[in-house]
Structures are given as C-alpha cells and as structure tokens.
Image: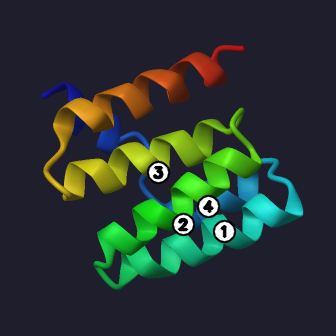
C-alpha cells in the first residue's frame, strides 16, 4: 500500500522533470532513463538513473524515479529506500 500511494503522487514524469532543477548532465541522464522507462526497459533505466544519482545525489526526482524503477523490477525494499531518500530531500 505504501508503494502504491507513492507511485500515485507523480502522475506524469515528464511534468516532474520540467519542474525540477537538475544539472545539465543529470537532465540528459534523466531524459534517457525516462525514454527507457517508457519502453519498459527498467534494468537499463536503473543503470542510467544510478549514473544520474552520482552526478546529482541531492535530487528528489532521481531518487523517486529509482524507486519507481525498482518497483517495476519487483524490488520493493530497494524502492522503499529510494522513496524515503526522495521524501527527505523534498523536505529540505
């Protein structure tokens, strides 16, 4: 239930990407990951998002997207970790 509620909070990733401040390098990686997610290529999207997280570790969006990818990969405990970090970053 917890994960479902979190997934329903961001109805459209494209809108979230536009509304979030990302470095240019992180922005390119997030857009690439979004394309992969749109094509259901979640393992590849996770790899790209992990790179983005190294470029900009303070991004709630990147962490939220990592949570979503891990839900799709059936890794709820990993997803929960990323959702928790995203929530902490959003509150700072």
In the image, which is nearer the foreground, mark 4 or mark 3?
Answer: 3
In the image, which is nearer the foreground, mark 2 or mark 4?
Answer: 2
State the CA–CA distance, disc 1 to disc 3: 12 Å
In the image, which is nearer the foreground, mark 1 or mark 3?
Answer: 1
Q: Are marks 1 and 3 in contact (CB under 8 Å)?
A: no
Asked if residue 38 is positioned above or below residue 83 in the image, the reply reads below
Residue toward you, 3 or 67: 67
State the CA–CA distance, disc 1 to disc 4: 16 Å
Q: How many marks?
A: 4
Residue 59, given in percent of the width and then of the height, sits at 68, 39
- Per the rendering, the mark at residue 65 is 3
The residue identified by callout 1 is: 29
Point 86% across, 55% down: residue: 23
In the image, which is nearer the foreground, mark 3 or mark 2?
Answer: 2
Point 64% across, 23% down: residue: 89
Residue toward you, 67 or 4: 67
The residue identified by callout 2 is: 48
Q: Are marks 2 and 4 in contact (CB under 8 Å)?
A: no
Which mark is first along the chain, 2 or 3?
Answer: 2
Which mark is first along the chain, 4 or 1?
Answer: 4
Which mark is first along the chain, 3 or 1?
Answer: 1
State the CA–CA distance, disc 2 to disc 1: 6 Å
- Per the rendering, the mark at residue 15 is 4
Q: Are marks 3 and 2 in contact (CB under 8 Å)?
A: no
State the CA–CA distance, disc 3 to disc 2: 11 Å
Which mark is first along the chain, 1 or 2?
Answer: 1
Point 61% across, 58% down: residue: 51
**The residue tagged with tag 1: helix, strand or loop?**
helix
């Amino acid at each position: 239930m917890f994960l479902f509620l979190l997934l329903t909070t961001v109805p459209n990733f494209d809108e979230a990407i536009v509304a979030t401040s990302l470095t240019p390098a992180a922005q390119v990686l997030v857009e690439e990951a979004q394309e992969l997610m749109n094509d259901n290529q979640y393992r590849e999207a996770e790899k790209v998002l992990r790179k983005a997280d190294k470029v900009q570790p303070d991004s709630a969006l990147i962490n939220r997207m990592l949570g979503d990818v891990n839900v799709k990969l059936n890794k709820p405990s990993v997803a929960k970790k990323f959702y928790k970090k995203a929530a902490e970053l959003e509150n700072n």
